[in-house]
Image (cartoon, rainbow, N blue to C red):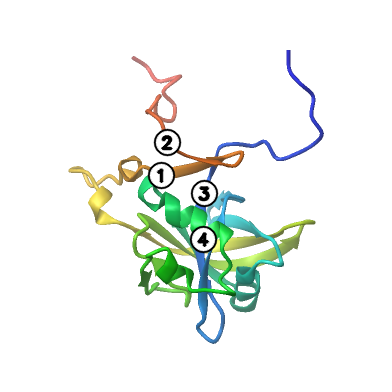
Amino acid sequence: MKQSWKPGNMLYPLPVVMVSCADKAGKDNIITIAWTGTICSDPAMLSISVRPERHSYKMIEETGEFVVNLTTEELAFATDYCGVKSGRDMDKWAAAKLTREKADVVSAPMIKESPVNIECRVTEKKELGTHVMFLAEVVAVHADEKYMDEKNKFRLENAKPLVYSHGTYYSMGKELGTFGYSVRKK
């Protein structure tokens, strides 16, 4: 038997990412976001949803740029910390022991410790109630070479990526199959 609940967000697990951004004066910040996702493959696009009262919101709105930095087990503490502390009051980079790295296209810095950095430019802003969704085109992607295998295939699973589920962080589990395995000829 299942319980019936009021409408709510139960689409879990989600990727949890750290988004780095900067204002036009160059002051930067990091915000942790679980309301994120892929929205288009050609052109490559993704979305992030941010509460307008968050410190990073004004930076993203002002410049129209940000970097999505994928998170790992090793970055779990920093990921949580950057989600509960405000950059209005402190330098999250120093407090979370993260390193700024220059991006190729956008002015926002990347997080060096992240295995994948996705540079983005906002194409549209949608006000949706508690959050504003920024739709963004991916303008550059950076992948850490230490996760490349001998066939030059990127193995993100070796970085032990984080996911977020109803208030809790988890690492990914075992591989169950690859895309199309259910119909592949044996």
Residue behind mark 3: 16
Please name the residue shown 50% across and 58% down the image: 81
Q: Nearer the viewer, residue 23 or 63?
A: 23
Q: Earlier in the sequence, mark 3 or mark 2?
A: 3
| 172 vs 147: above or below | above
- Local secondary structure at mark 2: loop
Closest to the camera, between mark 4 and mark 1, is: 4
For badge 1, the amino acid type reads: Pro
Quarter of the image containing the N terminus? top right
Asked if the residue under mark 3 is in contact with the one under mark 1, i.e. CB atoms within 8 Å, the reply is: no
Mark 3 neighbour density, 10 Å: few (under 14) some (14–19) many (20 or more) = many
- Local secondary structure at mark 4: helix
3D distance between C-alphas at marks 3 and 4:
11 Å
For badge 3, the amino acid type reads: Val
- Local secondary structure at mark 1: loop
Closest to the camera, between mark 2 and mark 4, is: 4
Q: Nearer the viewer, residue 103 or 171?
A: 171
Residue behind mark 4: 82
